Image (spheres, coloured by chain):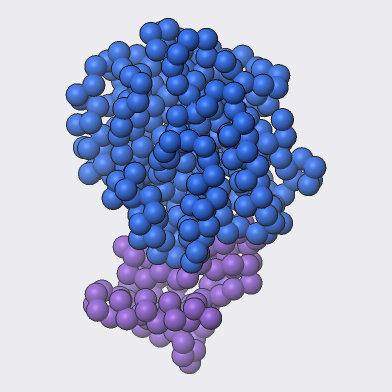
Amino acid sequence: MNVKRRTLLLAGAALVAGAATSKAADDTSGDKQVVVIDNHAYLPPDLEVKVGTVVQWVNQDGDEHDVTENKKAFRSPILDKGEEWKRLFDQPGTVEYYCSLHPHMIGKIRVV
Amino acid sequence: MAKDDEQVTRRGALECMAWAAGGLVWTVSGGIPTSRLLGVGEAHAATPGFSFVQMSDTHVGYNKEANPDVTATLREAIAKVNGLQTRPAFVLHTGDVTHLSQAGSHEVAVDVLKTLKVDHMHAVPGEHDLANDGYARWKDLWGRQTGEKGWVSFDQGGVHFVGLNNVSERSGKLGALGTEQLEWLEKDLSTRSASTPIVVFAHVPLWSVYPDWGWATADSERAMTALKKFGSVTVLNGHIHQTLQKVEGKVAFHTASSTAFPQPAPGSTAAPGPMTVPADKLKSVLGVTQVNFVPNKGPLAIVDHSLAT
Ligand SMILES: [Cu+2]
Ligand SMILES: [Fe+2]
Ligand SMILES: [Fe+2]
């Protein structure tokens, strides 16, 4: 599907920008944590992970959502119900994100 | 503590709202708006003037439970507009033309909207038009009328129209107009006399409908300050897929129905989003908005037409 292609394009853009603290994660080795999207919310909204963790967002809501870094360093494709997207966090720091369709939906990943 | 504050805010927001059901005629005269409920039908302009129509949230490409055929209801909405006794001069589309800006969806929307019997159409973007990197496509199709950045102003029949983009910028948990656009707006309005009737249109409400759901614009207050000098201001928004109105001094705020699917009343459910109603009720919660203007007499009458009537 073009979901994968988009993930790769975004990863490329992030590398060019040189400002990413995380990477698109097609490779799922290492720790994994899940953020569930439901009722227009990220659960948990604030997640602490170890460096090297892959975070997977799973949309369980009937409405579509995405995961957009606050400064647009990365952006997931639009996730429909049942779709998921993951990203590797390989640098310490805090990554804040929101849903581009619903800006009241916010979350953060604290990488330690 | 935070929870209490939140509840106070919610209650406050709800108290400010008046629900509009069925046909509502809204007259603004000398800056003091009044409204009265209509049965079925439309307001007739007694003297020459013009009318225009607001369409919103057509969400072409949506096909889930709340409305599996949004193109069909859009065609019905267009038939409603084409059948109005007072032919509208133009249509304002207040955004979410497409559902997710999927490939081809803007083109489908334009093809269907072309069947409107109006001279021209102005659209401002909704956040759904920006999905899937859709802004480039949106600009290709609408930018010529609306302007590269999604904001525009024009004059018609003595009324000054301003279209704003409040979905490209973000501040806190809300969409925003942003400094560049606000500066443009202030400059644009500074050259108009206070007696010029103003119509402002934008996707997300420019008044605080329900910030917890993102139903407000972070920096709308600065825009409202720039509008303060005018004797008649009408603000037309979409995004919330239901008709709501509020009057604040000389400013009349109004939100339009979607032609695709309804959303819940503010705070009435856990989250906003497409709301499924019984199939025989759907058309009663979809519709278009007609606005009539009669020069010198000053009235600006707003009529919501549901697809069921
Ligand atoms: Cu969302
Ligand atoms: Fe919408
Ligand atoms: Fe919207």
Q: Residue at x 44, y 81 (%)?
A: A5
Colour for chain A in the figure:
purple
Observer-nearest of B111 and B193 = B111
Q: Quadrant of the C terminus of chain B?
A: top right
Is residue B16 in sight in this rendering? no
Residue A111 percent across, percent down from the top left: 38, 75
Q: Is residue B222 left or right of residue B134?
A: left
Is B58 in front, or is B48? B48
Residue B48 drawn at (x, y percent): 45, 13
Chain letter for blue, please: B
Q: Please state which of residues A104 and A93 is positioned toward the viewer in this rendering.
A: A104
- Using residue A3 as the reference point, say whether residue A91 is left or right of it: left
Residue at figure coordinates x 30%, y 32% from the top left: B154
User: Please, is residue B230 above or below residue B30 in the view?
Assistant: below
Quadrant assignment, res B182 = top left
| Residue pictured at 66% horizontal, 33% vertical | B306
Q: Is residue B277 above or below residue B186?
A: below
Total number of numbered discs in the rendering: 0
Residue A10 found in image quarter: bottom left
Is residue A50 placed above or below B84 in the rendered structure? below
Q: Residue at x 39, y 12 (%)?
A: B295
Image coords of residue A96 (percent x, y)? 38, 64
* Above or below, comparing residue A84 to residue B72 in the picture: below
Q: Is residue B73 visible?
A: yes
> Residue A63 location in percent, x, y?
60, 59
